[in-house]
Image (tube, rainbow, N blue to C red):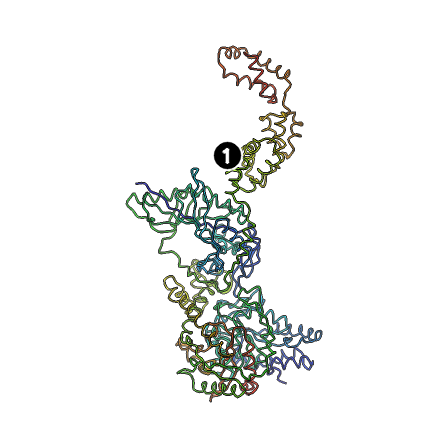
């Protein structure tokens, strides 16, 4: 049996019935990696030895304990984005500046996965410091889209999305600052969920933009995302911005009727320049939801047009400060120099890639004395307006439905020369981060060249349940999620 | 032309919390380099700060003691700059919305009370230390101090002389020590002071161009550094020049301030709200709780010492400078309540002999080997006539050095006062018979020789004779 093709639920059933061992599953996943990784290049670090040890340990637990209901992932092999710190295992953020960094601590999200017995398969490639939409900004190499190896997998969690789509893991964890989970999930034909800001502890997630970053699952179906959400969500004393809110069982809503649920269609999200095939698929998906009993309502998010500009001021400002610690003094890469200033300049000039430098410069500029009011402060004000847009709309509807990305996966190199074009691939996902609300991307069709298209569902603050419920209902009535790339 | 100085002080005070401001590391001073660090305070990737609530409590305490308004809503900001002792590349500090604002403290200058405004008090983290000496071609960084909580106390430009600045610093230090929030040690750097100084012709309202004087690292330099800087600015103006806005470093060995960087080279710190920490919401109830737990502060204690013990202002001021000294004084006074003049007598002993002995060993009152009751017991021996006031000084020093009680020392050393008239008379007679020339001169009217005779008698009796009786007997015999 090709165990690597399975979902969390399916693998768990087999483990529970003792039809397979944790080692069998891990071995199967590594066989798959051996077969396709050369083509995909999803991983920065493959942790085979650690995974075998972890598998043997959880096997003992599987034998000893009865698997506990819905939240268990005992023995499930997961791929982790390389910006989540893993104790004793190199964590690079796909940056030369951290090429040798081994954290002496574990992120809270992965700690919780460890407690539940997951097996770490490897650390996945990404755009350097999560800055990008294609993994082309990785300091090491570009990950390929499993559906078309000449195309990008999306980003920045491109490695996690490609690994999931190529069955190089059972599921994966990514992070999302402006669309970095949802956009690659859409472009690789898998499910990706960005939780509400504050739902998942950011402790141990290498910061890009602190007020926007969230960790979330990338999975082969909606149920697996709900299962992982049950584990990674927490109020963490180590993260002051993690929320102290009740934690539901996210799987409980799956399969519930969506009859009468109001779905908002924001007119600002169906724009000129959007790919026709994407538009058609998304509109069909809305019809499908309607046929399942949902009530479509046209709504308006009037400040949508300012989202990209607002995001690129705020995210870069925070990044310029967050990335100041990579100075060659304490850890990571250090270039020589004749004095301190020289060492700083050489280290950062050689250690960071061009996109990271571009964003550090943008952010430094936006925070500079004399420009702060016009840029950072103004952007904060617009952010408040964007947040209010959502609050208003959510008075009328339960879930907002949009395309995840304006196009399907583009060709490698197609947009690298034009950063603005690249930034626009997150045009539909960015507002969600600015507002702090949850969003999920699920497969909703394919282009004529067999490239996946994603549907985005956006929910109220701390209402991941509604988007999971609608996403599950849609998924169960379609076959898109069952399609796998031919590799 | 006569000039007036305008001075505002920025004081950094290390808070005496057990642990650092954003992590659980110890704040102990003087450990091996980098032994009190963790991924959080050394700024590793992905770690997050969590506020130590005790540090916030200490700042609120200080704000209340300095008559500030405590903000119900305040937030942290990042101050961005590169330096090896700053591992994150930014310091978590406050910019807009500090915890405390609009306060004041009172100082006494030339017998007059003056209010010095407190603009703001905010909370921030300390940086580490770069080590350049004895390290060959490299510099090293010690991050033990990184993340130790600091509070920055900014005064209004209300200070008009180096003397006022010094009084302000003394009062501020006393308050911090009374509250137990900072040990106030400028030499060890737990209390640091930067000064903004400008001058203007007397009577002029507009401020002159100011300079910032840094590195005033000892109490004794506060006045010296400011005096120098004011003189320097006056000289610049009188020579027809202009004071340049700049940062200057005080060099204590040369006794001068030197230019460090000009306005053009001033950092742009790119302050922005710290996104990793939620705003601090301080509830009224908590402020009230902290307020009710405040100790009696130096000013109130000083006034009470005047009214309750009848002490002169000068004594009260000295005794209330340090809370432990005031406590020592009050305990001694409480166990010696025999006479109305008791409090003043004890004050004299504390200011005089006790302070002298402590200073000789550079000990603080907390390290004083003498218990307050021991002083009271000794004073009772004087009252009973067992020892004279003169002998008491010897007894006191002996008590201080050995820890023994006064009575024991008096017995051991045979210091009991001679009050037996016949014994004293014998000594007086001996002195008179041995010094016929002096007797003759005395009788001829040279009355100041009385002191000589008393001295001789005391010498003969090894200081133990009751001085009053010696005086009376001498007068009788020589007249």
Asked if residue B453 is positioned above or below residue A145 in the image, the reply reads above
Q: Which residue is mark 1?
A: B312
Identity of the residue furthest to the right in this view: A64
Identity of the residue furthest to the left in this view: B240
Q: Residue at x 61, y 15 (%)?
A: B425
Q: Between residues A146 and B456, which one lies in front from this camera angle?
A: B456
Q: Residues within 10 Å of mark 1 (few under 14, many from 20)?
A: few
Q: Between residues B143 and B246, which one lies in front from this camera angle?
A: B246
Q: Position of residue B207 (x, y in %)?
A: 34, 49
Asked if residue B431 is positioned above or below residue A108 in the image, the reply reads above
Q: Chain of mark 1?
A: B
Q: Between residues A457 and A7, which one lies in front from this camera angle?
A: A457
State which quadrant residue B224 falls in: top left
Q: Position of residue B371 (x, y in %)?
A: 62, 37
Q: Between residues B28 and B110, which one lies in front from this camera angle?
A: B110
Asked if residue A383 is positioned above or below residue B242 in the image, the reply reads below
Q: Quadrant of the N terminus of chain B?
A: top left
Q: Quadrant of the C terminus of chain B?
A: top right
Q: Position of residue A54 (x, y in %)?
A: 64, 72
Whether residue B362 is visible here, answered yes or no, is: yes
Whether residue B375 is visible here, answered yes or no, is: no
Q: Position of residue A209 (x, y in %)?
A: 47, 68
Q: Secondary structure at mark 1?
A: loop
């Amino acid at each position: 049996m090709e165990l690597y093709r399975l979902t969390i639920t399916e693998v768990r059933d087999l483990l529970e019935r003792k039809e397979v061992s944790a080692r069998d599953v891990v071995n199967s996943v590594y066989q798959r990696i051996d077969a396709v990784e050369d083509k995909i290049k999803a991983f920065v670090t493959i942790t085979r030895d650690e995974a075998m040890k972890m598998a043997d340990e959880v096997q003992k637990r599987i034998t000893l304990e009865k698997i506990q209901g819905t939240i268990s992932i005992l023995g499930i092999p997961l791929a982790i984005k390389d910006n989540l710190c893993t104790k004793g295992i190199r964590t690079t953020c796909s940056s030369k500046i951290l090429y040798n960094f081994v954290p002496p601590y574990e992120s809270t999200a992965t700690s919780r996965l460890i407690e539940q017995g997951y097996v770490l398969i490897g650390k996945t490639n990404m755009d350097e410091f999560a800055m990008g939409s294609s993994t082309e900004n990785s300091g090491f190499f570009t990950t390929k889209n499993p559906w078309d190896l000449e195309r990008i997998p999306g980003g920045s969690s491109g490695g996690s999305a490609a690994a999931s789509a190529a069955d190089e893991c059972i599921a994966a964890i990514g992070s999302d600052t402006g669309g970095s989970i949802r956009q690659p999930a859409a472009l690789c034909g898998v499910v990706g969920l960005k939780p509400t800001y504050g739902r998942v502890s950011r402790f141990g997630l290498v910061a890009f933009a602190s007020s926007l970053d969230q960790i979330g699952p990338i999975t082969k179906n909606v149920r697996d995302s709900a299962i992982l959400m049950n584990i990674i969500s927490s109020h963490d004393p180590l993260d002051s911005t993690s929320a102290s809110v009740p934690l539901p069982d996210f799987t409980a809503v799956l399969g519930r009727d969506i009859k009468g649920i109001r779905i908002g269609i924001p007119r600002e999200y169906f724009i000129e320049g959007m790919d026709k095939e994407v538009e058609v698929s998304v509109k069909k998906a809305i019809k499908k939801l309607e046929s399942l009993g949902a009530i479509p309502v046209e709504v308006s998010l009037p400040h949508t047009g300012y989202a990209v500009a607002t995001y690129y001021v705020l995210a870069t400002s925070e990044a310029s400060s967050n990335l100041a610690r990579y100075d060659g003094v304490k850890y990571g890469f250090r270039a020589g120099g004749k004095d301190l200033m020289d060492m700083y300049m050489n280290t950062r000039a050689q250690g960071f890639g061009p996109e990271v430098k571009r964003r550090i410069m943008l952010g430094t500029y936006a925070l500079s004395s004399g420009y702060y009011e016009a840029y950072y402060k103004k952007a904060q004000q617009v952010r408040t307006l964007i947040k209010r847009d959502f609050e208003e709309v959510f008075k009328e509807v339960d879930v907002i439905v949009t395309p995840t990305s304006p196009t399907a996966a583009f060709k490698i190199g197609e947009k690298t020369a034009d950063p603005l074009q690249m930034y626009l691939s997150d045009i539909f996902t960015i507002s969600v981060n600015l507002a702090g609300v949850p969003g999920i991307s699920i497969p909703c069709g394919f282009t004529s060249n067999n490239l996946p298209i994603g549907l985005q569902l956006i929910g109220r603050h701390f209402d991941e349940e509604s988007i999971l419920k609608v996403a599950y209902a849609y998924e169960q009535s379609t076959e898109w999620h069952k399609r796998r790339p031919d590799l | 032309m006569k000039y007036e100085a305008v001075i505002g002080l920025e004081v950094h005070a290390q808070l005496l919390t057990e642990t650092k401001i954003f992590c659980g590391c110890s704040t102990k001073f003087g450990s091996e380099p980098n032994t009190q660090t963790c991924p959080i305070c050394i700024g590793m990737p992905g770690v997050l700060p969590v506020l130590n609530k005790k540090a916030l409590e200490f700042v609120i305490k200080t704000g209340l003691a300095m008559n500030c308004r405590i903000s119900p809503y305040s937030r942290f900001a990042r101050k961005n700059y590169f330096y090896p002792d700053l591992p994150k590349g930014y310091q978590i500090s406050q910019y807009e919305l500090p915890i405390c604002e609009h306060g004041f403290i009172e100082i006494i200058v030339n017998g007059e009370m003056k209010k010095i405004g407190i603009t703001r008090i905010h909370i921030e983290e300390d940086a580490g230390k770069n080590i350049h000496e004895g390290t060959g071609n490299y510099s090293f960084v010690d991050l033990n101090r990184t993340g130790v909580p600091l509070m920055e106390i900014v005064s209004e430009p209300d200070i008009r002389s180096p003397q006022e600045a010094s009084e302000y610093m003394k009062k501020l230090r006393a308050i911090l020590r009374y509250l137990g929030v900072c040990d106030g040690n400028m030499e060890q750097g737990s209390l640091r002071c930067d000064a903004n100084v400008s001058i203007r012709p007397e009577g002029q309202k507009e401020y002159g161009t100011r300079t910032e004087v840094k590195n005033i690292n000892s109490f004794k330099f506060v006045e010296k550094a400011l005096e120098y800087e004011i003189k320097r600015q006056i000289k610049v103006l009188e020579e027809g020049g202009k004071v340049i806005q700049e940062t200057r470093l005080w060099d204590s060995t040369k006794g001068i301030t030197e230019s460090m960087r000009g306005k053009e080279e001033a950092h742009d710190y790119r302050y922005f709200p710290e996104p990793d920490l939620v705003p601090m919401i301080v509830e009224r109830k908590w402020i009230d709780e902290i307020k009710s737990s405040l100790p009696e502060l130096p000013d109130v204690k000083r006034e009470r010492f005047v009214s309750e013990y009848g002490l002169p202002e000068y004594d009260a001021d000295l005794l209330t400078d340090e809370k432990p000294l005031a406590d020592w004084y009050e305990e001694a006074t409480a166990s010696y309540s025999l006479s109305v003049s008791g409090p003043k007598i004890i004050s004299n002993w504390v200011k005089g002999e006790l302070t002298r002995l402590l200073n000789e060993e550079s000990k603080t009152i907390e390290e004083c080997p003498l218990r307050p009751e021991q002083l009271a017991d000794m004073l009772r021996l004087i009252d009973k006539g067992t020892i004279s006031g003169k002998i008491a000084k010897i007894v006191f020093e002996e008590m201080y050095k050995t820890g023994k009680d006064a009575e024991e020392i008096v017995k051991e050393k045979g210091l009991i006062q001679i009050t037996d008239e016949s014994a004293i008379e014998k000594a007086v007679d001996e002195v008179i018979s041995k010094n016929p020339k002096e007797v003759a001169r005395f009788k001829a009217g040279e009355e100041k020789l009385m002191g000589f005779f008393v001295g001789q008698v005391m010498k003969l009796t090894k200081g133990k004779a009751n001085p009053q009786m010696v005086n009376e007997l001498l007068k009788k015999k020589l007249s």
